[in-house]
Image (cartoon, coloured by chain):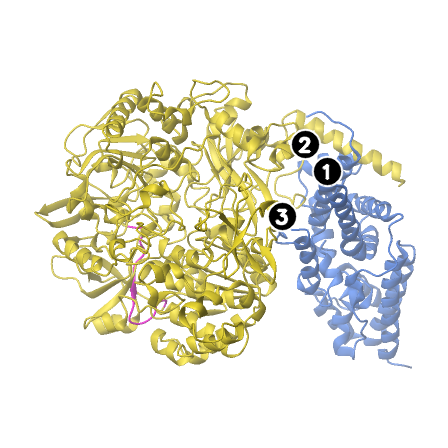
């Protein structure tokens, strides 16, 4: 196989390589890292980033439950089906979505009929807007904070590719995932579920965040699911924990302000605003 | 990062990939989500690298050429990719072909198990000739030339001596659509004999009478409600292509209704599983239809436009007003007796459940996909009314050729016109098309031993081709009697890839290729689209890619295994070596007149001239159409065909038209050339000889359906004209196993189901499949088991009208009380240790005059062979061959063998052993005679002096002049 320059094929290879990068490290991926000009990722780093802190599934960040699956995954799967493609078992995994993007670009590149090609190009832009940019803005921001190694650099690269793809194609309307009515927690019992569902609260709280809060506030970190750990922190010291949450929310809002495109950054920021308001209401005064 | 930086990074990655792959290494890691499925990208099929699992833990890369073909293990023709080791040029494994539009890269277990069949240590690799008496089991290897000359001489002699009807070709698994029919036609013999009357012909009659097209094409993927009357949809025909689409529909929320006496694989997925008394399915369909009619839930406009209600009113109610409104009044009365309570009484399914299901069906609108194939339609007297009443539901709701509805299969199938088309043969073979069954859709193949016994004729050269009538057909001992009598069957040539029970009684066994060793072109109705797929000898293609020239597939297949197309061309040339019989011309090259046609030219011409869009698609990749198909294996001709009947006939087809009083339009215009030669019915021309071209509806001439009326035939004038007027509209015919027909203590036996990993007689040499399923116990409900004093695993005698078999009981609530069931895919046997070692018991076969006994001497077990896997056969059981104990039970209209049996089940007697079979073929003759009494011969009923309605489909259609009744 001899390399022949082709902008479409080049971009498809870049997307696939970026997608493969969030799979479990192997000698193969070390070679890909070198090609991308990144450090080779380590297995422990992969486990920490993608298994412990920030699993790369759109549904975690876009579903009102804040978990893998649910309506958000169904919407992503529906997009695959609309393209007459059978969704894989994990249609909302970042690698699958980048692979899908590459495949649509290739299909558009190979399509001889102009009207059909335009449709495929439109589909590619829709994929990026609806199912990638919609959650990658906060996700990659937080990943960049969390990892200063290979994955942090990779996150910056993915963000650049998304940003470049949307250049001139950003849309005024919000992605469907972010059009859900913005609800507020009804009370302290609902608060934990609300905060841990990024599409509702506008913030991403990782295990590392909770651990950091416990250390900073001098509280005991009870290990378990994030909901269990956060509930436990609130039970130990409600007011300081709520205050920390408000500060963290504000901090994340500032981070998103720099994110592009504006409509998506705005959607996430406004959710953080609601969260801050709710936290203010719930936090005991005095 | 700037856009330029990103662009440069993309170039760097792509260049790195090119460099890595140029070294023969893999760039992307294996299991990853970046490709849409786990298929090798087709750009890399020439040189695909995988790690060799057998070398683990060492990392050794294996390089493969991936060559597509299609599976041969059932009719679906799913796509396979053969992984050919580039070092050894041997097939290492088979996986799915993602380029195949029907199977979309997915396969059932039978696809990958093809490798077992290819490497089967017991397979037949060379032509064999009988050495002793027929059935004695002694063989000598012969040259192909010797065998071909002998067979050709006999065929030629039969033809030149005016005995063309003594040449017969009996086919099991279909090969290429129409290929062998054309071979027979070129020989001028009416010798095509299909297995369809033990298979699907009952269902086909029901569909044919409605549409003039004899198979349904349900668009499951887009349905809102899927209504299945079959055990065969997720466990048999089109299992994989249909099951994957049913699953997709269910993921969208579609409802699945399954009528099945057993808790089949399909039923386990159902939202509504109805387990009716067998044979009552049509009564349930009619109760649902009645509900739709009485509640006004039918698509009134569709019924008005597309049903032939006008002919019905004219024939049955000539004195009433001939309006649609008047028909609606009649319709409201016709089915009023089919209440839910009536259906409950027949089926045993509670009326309330039926009502609930009826409302689900009625709510589907035009997105009701329905399917009935073998199952009830193949099990019961009058089974053809099961599919006819099922399609009534589609016809009421207008769910015909709609998204999510049921389409006529011919619109979802593409059969490319071949390079040569010989004329219709000028003879009629009464051994396959007897006068008693003028409405049968297919050959009365399974009655052949009885016809030979009666002296209706004899067969001088009998080809069984991938077919095993001794084992598959009912009444196998009568087959053995016929095949061992050389005055009835002169020369028996078995064309088979595997040993089978019929081949033991052959004079020649000629080894034919498996799915990766033969050519065929296929197209099947699996969604609303048309595709063609190419089966090919994969090693031939791999060698050709490596620069070799292969002109004879035997050069690359194992041993001297041949592919059929080359075989038939060669045999034909030896029958007519100098062309003096006028036969050879249909097997000659066009490029090199006077020379033999080769498969490359045959398919090259077809793909170049008869598959629209393929030449252009191939040119996009700088390939010839043949190279494209050899490389990718499939091509989608059309997607979203839709309602062809609604198409308006263009003016250039309407020259000097005539029209009957019901709007059937006839034309003098010639039929436009059509590259798709899919079989369609051929309604008669009008009195002036003009061909039917369409039907006028509301002033416009539409294409319509290929029926006499051009419309959907709710009312079959054909049935009226041919003496069966009482069944002219969809109705209910109580089965031969209806409770009123059973003697005390008898129960119905369901024998029409199979297990999803086995396929008739050709999977016995698939060790992987046998390991999954290798026995066929008798399903019996705990209530019945308790009544009979049976426990799980007890031996039972199952007594039919002609004999009995001994099998183990499986006590399960997965079957309706009062009914027993036994899968028909088990019980393979051989007479000596010669033959398949896997999944075949060794038996003794004894007879005293016409009383036959078969006794198991030993089951299967581990054995040493070239395949180390045979030492790991841990089971001994291979099941029991129940079909031997079934008499023939031909439906008098469809000709379909009615498989369900009225049996007595009781504990085995002392001395009975597992697998014992006993039959008296004198009783077989008696039962045959009883069923023959039900027929109405064409000599009595023919309205026009012909043997059968000319318009009906027939696999090999003789010339019109020989349709006349003898002596007329």
Looking at the image, is B950 positioned above or below residue B99? Answer: below
Q: Position of residue B282 (x, y in %)?
A: 39, 68
Label 2 – label 3 distance at C-alpha: 35 Å
Q: Can you identify the residue that label 3 sits on?
A: B651
Q: Which mark is residue B620?
A: 2
Q: If the image is split into quadrants, where does the N terminus of chain B sit?
A: top right
Above or below, comparing residue B692 to residue B402 in the picture = above
Q: Residue at x 47, y 57 (%)?
A: B211
**Do tags 2 and 3 sit on the same chain?**
yes
Subunit that carries the residue with mark 2: B
Mark 1 on the same chain as mark 3: no
Q: Secondary structure at mark 3?
A: helix
Badge 1: chain ID: A
Which chain is displayed in blue in the rendered image?
A
Q: Nearer the viewer, mark 1 or mark 3?
A: 3
- Residues in magenta? B814-826
Asked if residue B552 lies in the magenta stretch, the reply is no
Hey, which quadrant is residue B739 in on the image? bottom left
Disc 1 and disc 2 in contact, CB within 8 angstroms:
yes
Is residue A97 depicted above or below B8 in this figure?
A: below
Residue at image mark 1: A112
**Front disc: 2 or 3:** 3
What is chain B's hue in the picture? yellow
> From this viewpoint, which residue is outermost toward the left?
B848
């Amino acid at each position: 196989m001899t390399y022949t320059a082709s902008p479409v094929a080049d971009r498809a290879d870049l997307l696939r390589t970026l997608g493969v990068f969030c799979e479990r490290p192997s000698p193969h991926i070390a070679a890909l890292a070198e090609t991308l000009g990144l450090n080779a990722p380590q297995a422990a780093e992969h486990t920490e980033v993608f298994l412990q802190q920030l699993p790369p599934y759109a549904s975690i960040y876009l579903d009102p439950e804040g978990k893998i699956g649910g309506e958000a995954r169904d919407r992503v799967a529906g997009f695959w089906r609309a393209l007459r493609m059978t969704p894989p078992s994990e249609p909302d995994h970042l690698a699958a979505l980048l692979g899908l993007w590459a495949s649509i670009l290739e299909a558009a590149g190979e399509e001889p009929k102009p009207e059909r090609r335009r449709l495929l190009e439109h589909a590619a832009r829709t994929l990026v807007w609806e199912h990638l940019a919609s959650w990658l803005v906060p996700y990659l921001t937080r990943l960049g904070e969390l990892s200063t190694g290979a994955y942090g650099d990779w996150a910056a690269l993915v963000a650049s590719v998304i940003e470049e793809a949307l250049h001139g194609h950003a849309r005024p309307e919000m992605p469907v995932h972010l059009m859900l009515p913005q609800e507020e927690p009804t009370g302290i019992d609902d608060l934990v579920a609300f905060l841990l569902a990024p599409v509702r609260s506008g913030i991403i709280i990782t295990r590392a965040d909770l651990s950091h809060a416990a250390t900073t506030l001098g509280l005991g970190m009870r290990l378990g699911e994030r909901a269990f750990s956060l509930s436990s922190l609130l039970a130990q010291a409600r007011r300081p924990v709520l205050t920390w949450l408000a500060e963290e929310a504000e901090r994340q809002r500032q981070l998103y302000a720099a994110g592009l495109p504006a409509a998506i950054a705005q959607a996430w920021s406004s959710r953080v605003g609601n969260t801050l308001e709710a936290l203010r209401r719930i936090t005991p005064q005095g | 990062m700037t856009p330029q930086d990103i662009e440069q990074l993309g170039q760097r990655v792509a260049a790195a990939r090119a460099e890595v792959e140029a070294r023969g290494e893999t760039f992307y890691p294996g299991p990853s989500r970046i490709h849409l499925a786990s298929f090798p990208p087709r750009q890399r099929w020439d040189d695909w690298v995988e790690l060799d699992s057998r070398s683990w833990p060492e990392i050794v890369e294996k390089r493969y050429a991936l060559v597509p073909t299609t599976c041969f293990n059932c009719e679906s023709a799913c796509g396979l990719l053969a992984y050919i080791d580039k070092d050894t040029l041997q097939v290492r494994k088979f996986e799915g072909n993602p380029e195949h539009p029907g199977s979309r890269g997915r396969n059932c277990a039978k696809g990958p198990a093809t490798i077992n069949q290819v490497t089967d240590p017991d397979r037949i690799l060379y032509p064999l000739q009988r050495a002793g008496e027929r059935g004695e089991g002694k063989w000598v290897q012969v040259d192909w030339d010797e065998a071909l000359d002998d067979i050709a001489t006999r065929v030629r002699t039969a033809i030149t001596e005016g005995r063309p009807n003594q040449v017969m070709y009996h086919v099991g698994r279909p090969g290429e659509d129409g290929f062998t029919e054309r071979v027979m036609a070129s020989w001028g013999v009416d010798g095509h004999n299909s297995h369809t009357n033990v298979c699907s012909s009952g269902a086909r009659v029901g569909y044919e009478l409605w549409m003039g097209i004899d198979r349904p094409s349900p668009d499951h993927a887009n349905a809102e409600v899927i209504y299945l009357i079959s055990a065969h949809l997720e466990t048999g025909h089109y299992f994989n292509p249909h099951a994957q689409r049913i699953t997709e529909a269910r993921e969208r929320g579609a409802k699945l209704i399954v009528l099945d006496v057993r808790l089949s694989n399909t039923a386990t997925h159902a939202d509504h599983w109805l387990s009716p008394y067998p044979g009552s399915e049509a009564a349930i369909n009619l109760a649902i239809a009645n509900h739709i009619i009485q509640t006004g839930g039918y698509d009134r406009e569709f019924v008005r436009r597309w049903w032939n209600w006008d002919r019905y009113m004219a024939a049955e109610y000539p004195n009433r007003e001939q309006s649609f409104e008047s028909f609606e009044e009649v319709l409201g009365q016709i089915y009023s007796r089919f209440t839910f309570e009536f259906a409950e009484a027949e089926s045993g399914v509670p009326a309330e459940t039926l009502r609930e299901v009826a409302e689900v069906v009625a709510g589907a609108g035009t997105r009701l996909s329905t399917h009935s194939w073998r199952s009830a339609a193949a099990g019961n007297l009058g089974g053809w009314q099961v599919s006819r009443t099922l399609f009534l539901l589609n016809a009421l709701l207008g769910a015909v050729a709609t998204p999510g509805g049921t389409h006529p299969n011919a619109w979802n199938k593409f059969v490319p016109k071949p390079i040569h088309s010989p004329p219709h043969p000028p003879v009629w073979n009464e051994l396959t098309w007897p006068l008693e069954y003028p409405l049968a859709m297919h050959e009365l193949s399974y009655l052949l031993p009885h016809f030979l016994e009666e002296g209706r004729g004899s067969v001088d050269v009998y080809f069984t081709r991938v077919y095993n009538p001794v084992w598959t057909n009912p009444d196998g001992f009568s087959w053995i009697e016929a095949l061992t009598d050389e005055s009835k069957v002169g020369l028996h040539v078995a064309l088979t890839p595997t040993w089978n029970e019929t081949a033991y009684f052959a004079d020649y066994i000629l080894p034919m290729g498996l799915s990766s060793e033969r050519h065929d072109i296929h197209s099947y109705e699996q969604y609303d689209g048309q595709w063609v797929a190419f089966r090919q000898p994969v090693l031939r293609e791999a060698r050709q890619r490596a620069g070799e020239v292969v002109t004879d597939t035997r050069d690359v297949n194992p041993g001297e295994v041949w592919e059929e197309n080359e075989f038939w061309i060669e045999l034909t040339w030896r029958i007519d070596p100098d062309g003096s019989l006028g036969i050879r011309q249909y097997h000659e090259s066009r490029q090199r007149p006077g020379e033999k046609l080769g498969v490359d030219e045959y398919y090259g011409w077809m793909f170049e001239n008869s598959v629209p869009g393929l030449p252009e698609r191939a040119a996009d990749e700088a390939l010839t159409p043949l190279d494209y198909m050899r490389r990718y294996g499939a091509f989608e001709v059309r997607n979203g065909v839709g309602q062809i009947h609604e198409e308006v006939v263009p003016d250039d087809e309407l020259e000097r038209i005539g029209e009957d009083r019901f709007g059937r339009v006839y034309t003098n215009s010639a039929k436009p050339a059509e590259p798709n030669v899919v079989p369609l019915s051929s309604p008669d021309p009008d009195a002036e000889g003009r061909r039917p071209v369409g039907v006028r509806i509301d002033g416009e001439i539409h294409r319509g359906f290929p029926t006499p009326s051009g419309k959907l035939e709710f009312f079959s004038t054909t049935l009226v004209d041919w003496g069966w007027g009482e069944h002219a509209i969809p109705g209910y015919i109580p089965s031969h196993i209806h409770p009123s027909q059973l003697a005390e203590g008898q129960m119905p036996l369901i024998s029409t189901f199979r297990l999803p990993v086995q396929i008739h007689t050709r999977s016995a040499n698939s060790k992987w499949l046998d390991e999954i399923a290798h026995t066929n116990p008798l399903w019996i409900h705990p209530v019945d088991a308790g009544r009979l004093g049976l426990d799980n695993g007890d031996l039972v005698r199952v007594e039919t009208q002609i004999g009995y078999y001994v099998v183990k009981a499986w006590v399960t609530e997965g079957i309706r009380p009062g009914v027993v069931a036994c899968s028909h895919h088990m019980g393979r046997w051989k007479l000596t240790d010669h033959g398949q070692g896997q999944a075949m018991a060794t038996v003794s076969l004894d007879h005293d005059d016409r009383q036959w006994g078969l006794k198991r001497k030993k089951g299967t077990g581990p054995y040493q062979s070239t395949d180390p896997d045979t030492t790991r056969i841990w089971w001994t059981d291979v099941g029991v061959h129940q079909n031997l104990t079934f008499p023939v039970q031909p439906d008098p209209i469809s000709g379909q063998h009615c498989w369900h049996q009225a049996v007595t089940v009781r504990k085995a007697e002392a001395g009975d052993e597992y697998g014992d079979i006993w039959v008296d073929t004198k009783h077989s003759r008696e039962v045959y005679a009883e069923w023959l009494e039900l027929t109405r011969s064409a000599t009595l009923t023919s309205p026009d002096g012909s043997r059968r309605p000319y318009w009906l489909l027939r696999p090999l259609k003789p010339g019109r002049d020989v349709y006349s009744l003898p002596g007329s």
